[in-house]
Image: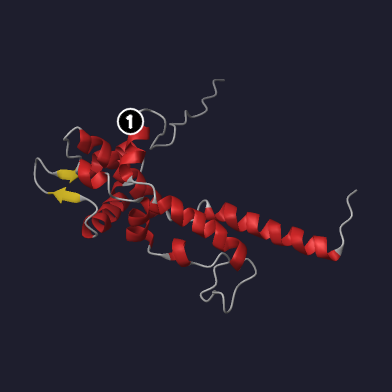
Amino acid sequence: MLKYNNSDKNVLYSEIIVIFVALNTLTMFSKACEYGIRAMIFIALRSKEHIRISLNDIASEIGTPPSFTAKILQKLVHEKLLVSTKGPTGGFVISEDRSAKITLAEIVSAIDGDSVFKGCGLGFRECDSERPCAVHYKFQDVRNSLSDMLENTVLAELTENTEKGLTFLKDREVEPNIKLN
């Protein structure tokens, strides 16, 4: 059995807290943000084929509820990350030029605001270098890495990977367990 002195225990507990917070950070995007990113990738894919895509087709292809997806897409249109056209030949579209410039950070900010970039690792309203939480300085590294990734990843890059079949936009369909008597 390993024995730790109090100093070692404090370091160990601190590391465990940082790992726990980092794991929770991996799912820090809201469902709306997750759906928005998936929708943007899918729309960019179809836009490369010069196809405007309807709300129902988007929701079906990425496996999201249509009414919730509509609200998310409205935000993205409002933030000028996406173009919407009404009518029988309408739908959503993103130009290839625009797709090459839109960062994940812009999509995340449009939907979830800046909490991913500025929020406290333990969820406190006030947490900064003058009044830091227990994981402030450790979490700062995690947040900075995430921020760097979001700022340096453009929509076109994600579209390419999905187009090549290297990534996916929808959970696998799960076959129901059918038991025959």
- Measured along the vertical axis of the image, is residue 164 above or below residue 42? above
Horizontal placement of 7 versus 21: left or right?
A: right
Indicate the quadrant where residue 20 lies. Answer: bottom right
- Measured along the vertical axis of the image, is residue 87 above or below residue 134? above
Q: Which residue occupies 58% across, 78% down?
A: 131
Horizontal placement of 10 versus 99: left or right?
A: right
Q: Which residue occupies 82% across, 65% down?
A: 7
Q: Residue furthest top?
A: 181
| Quadrant in the picture for the C terminus | top right
In percent of width and height, residue 145 lies at 51, 54
| Scheme of image coloration | secondary structure
In percent of width and height, residue 110 lies at 32, 59
In percent of width and height, residue 24 lies at 56, 55
56 and 168: which is toward the camera: 168
Give the residue type that dot 1 points to: Glu
Indicate the quadrant where residue 11 lies. Answer: bottom right
The residue beneath circle 1 is: 163
Does residue 116 appear in the picture of this structure?
yes
Q: Which residue occupies 26% across, 55% down?
A: 76
181 and 161: which is toward the camera: 161
**Circle 1 crowding by C-alpha within 10 Å: few under 14, some 14–19, many from 20:** some
In percent of width and height, residue 130 lies at 57, 79
